[in-house]
Image (spheres, grey):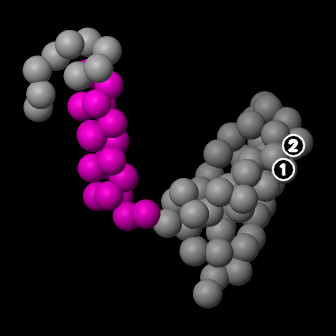
Amino acid sequence: MYKRNYNISRKAGDIMYTCYVVDNNGLESTNYFDTEQECINYVYWKWENEALFQQNSDELLSNAIENCKEIDSKNNNLREI
């Protein structure tokens, strides 16, 4: 089991804050925000939504393609893929 961790930093002269987050699954992410509060909100959001990121990339891609196919068939009257 991994330990949740985060780091919020801003180098002298930089405009953006760097937000580095590690969740319980060991997944790391880095994002950039205008304010420190936005970074803090992102850390909480990332930890509250860990389950969304547990799926493997093949499954996520497959689901995305299926959703696109459904949207195309309903909204655009396109033929089935």
- In the image, 24: left or right of 14? left
**Residue drawn 78% across and 55% down?**
44
Q: Amino acid at mark 2?
A: Glu
In the rendered image, which residue does mark 2 sit on?
36
Q: Amino acid at mark 1?
A: Ile
Q: Secondary structure at mark 1?
A: helix
- Quarter residue 8 falls in: bottom right
Q: Nearer the viewer, residue 37 or 64?
A: 64
Residue 58 % position (x, y): 29, 58
- In the image, 45: left or right of 78? right
In the rendered image, which residue does mark 1 sit on?
40
Asked if disc 1 and disc 2 are in contact, CB closer than 8 Å, the reply is yes
Q: Secondary structure at mark 2?
A: helix
- In the image, 14: left or right of 51? right
- In the image, 48: left or right of 29? right
**Residue drawn 49% across and 66% down?**
54
Instruction: Give the extent of the magenta segment.
Output: 55-72
Query: Exactly how many numbered labels are in the figure?
Result: 2
Is residue 9 visible from the viewing direction of this image?
no
